[in-house]
Amino acid sequence: MNAPIATGVPAFLARFEGLRTRLPGDPAPRLAAAEVLRTLGLPGRRNEAWHYTNLRPIEDAAFSEPLTALRDSGMLLARVPHIGTRLVFVDGRFRVDLSDTPPAIFRPFAMHARFGDLAQPAREPLVALNTMLAEDGAIITLPNDADGGTITLVSLATEAPGRTTAFHPRHQIRVAAGARLTLVEVALGTGTYLHNPVTEIAVEDGATLTHVRLQDESPSAYHLATLYSSVAASGTYDSFTLTLGGRLSRTEIHATLTGAGAIAHLNAAQILTGIQHADFTSVVRHAAPNGTSRQTVKNVLAGSSRGVFQGRIEVARDAQKTDGYQMNQALLLSPDAEVNSKPELEIFADDVKCSHGATVGELDAEQLFYLRSRGVPASEARAILVRAFLSEAIEAVAHDDARAMLERAVSDWWEQHPA
């Protein structure tokens, strides 16, 4: 009689046991992470932070190791616009043959593995899973006052018929004092797989990181990304995430403003259809005075899709003169679509300006009638109103090529999924 196939956490632990002697870097953090995962398991809906997102499909799946060498990724790569210096990862592994000449500020994690101190594997099971199994990723380090230009990290997932694969990239970005960098991330693929990246970002005094993320994974994929950013005095972390793909996806961002006058923008848009589920969760911690944070997250939901926004602003007692704002807006294109919105403020300082809000609605019938009465077809009229709804969020992306990439991705999505 055949033994049952291991799934979920037991399967991940078994894979770690088979790989542990071949994984790069110090094994101690990996062993500690394995113990965390063994003890906590994957987060369930009784966990407040995961109340709206169910990981049962991942618990029930048996994930295998990707076989990168057997797969052709040329057609996938052709879908990615060439912006700045392009660094390509296929099934979680750096591919120098598909990448531009790497700049001196880049090193692959597989050859220089060292875990940073921003991520919290002891508290976050998915970060523990990544720490346990991370094989590769991008380490980007800018020196003081450098201009790093634009770097695009491309993550491609190739289809493995009959096998559900998983990979866990570990990215580390450090922008030293006075330096500047635009980082564009694009994730897409084919087939069924789990993409579980963890990114640690340090923005030092007076530095600026513009971070644009496009998640356009396979419709049957799982994308669970966790990002940690630390922003020092007068530093700026300006991020935007566009979520289009994946059967189940979650972007979780922990941003800490550690120095006076630090700035964090965590903006996003989620455009979903069918049975897609996407979760955008953010925690902004103001730990120093005169900090500014802005979050605008927009959802466009068609079919039976479900969007989640959980945003929390935490203001420490010493973080006087904090200016924090968050807004979640949802546009429901179907009576079966659903959104869960949970904005929160936790304030211990007494001289702050903080606000939050949420709105949920449908397309305006009068605006639709106005466009139709002037000969605009129904589908095009709906597209015009949806793009107008999204324009405020996407126009906040200052980098012209990155913004054009996002606008093109939205247009392509609408052509494939007219609501």
Image (cartoon, rainbow, N blue to C red):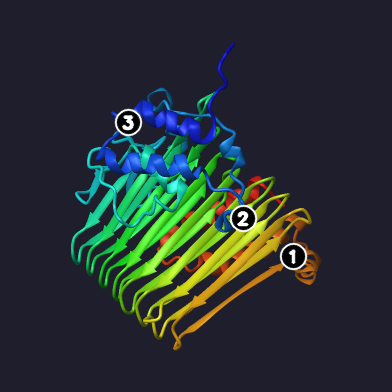
Q: What is the distance, in whole Å, between disc 3 and disc 1 at their CAs? A: 51 Å
Q: Mark 3 points at which residue?
A: 20
| Res 190 seen here | no
Q: What is the distance, in whole Å, between disc 1 and disc 2 at their CAs? A: 25 Å
Q: Where is residue 122 in the image (x, y as percent from the top left)?
A: 40, 51
User: Three-letter amino acid code at disc 1?
Assistant: Glu
Q: What is the distance, in whole Å, between disc 2 and disc 3 at their CAs? A: 33 Å
Q: Give the number of the mark in front: 1 or 2.
A: 2
Against 184, residue 374 (above or below) is below
Q: Position of residue 378 (x, y in %)?
A: 77, 57
Which residue is nearer to you in this view: 285 or 229? 285
User: Three-letter amino acid code at disc 2?
Assistant: His
Q: Name the residue under label 1.
A: 362
Q: Name the residue under label 2.
A: 51
Farthest residue in the front direction?
A: 39
Residue, x 78% and y 70% (percent of image)? 370
In screen coordinates, is 32 left or right of 405?
A: left
Q: Marks 1 and 3: in contact by CB < 8 Å?
A: no
How many marks the image carries: the answer is 3
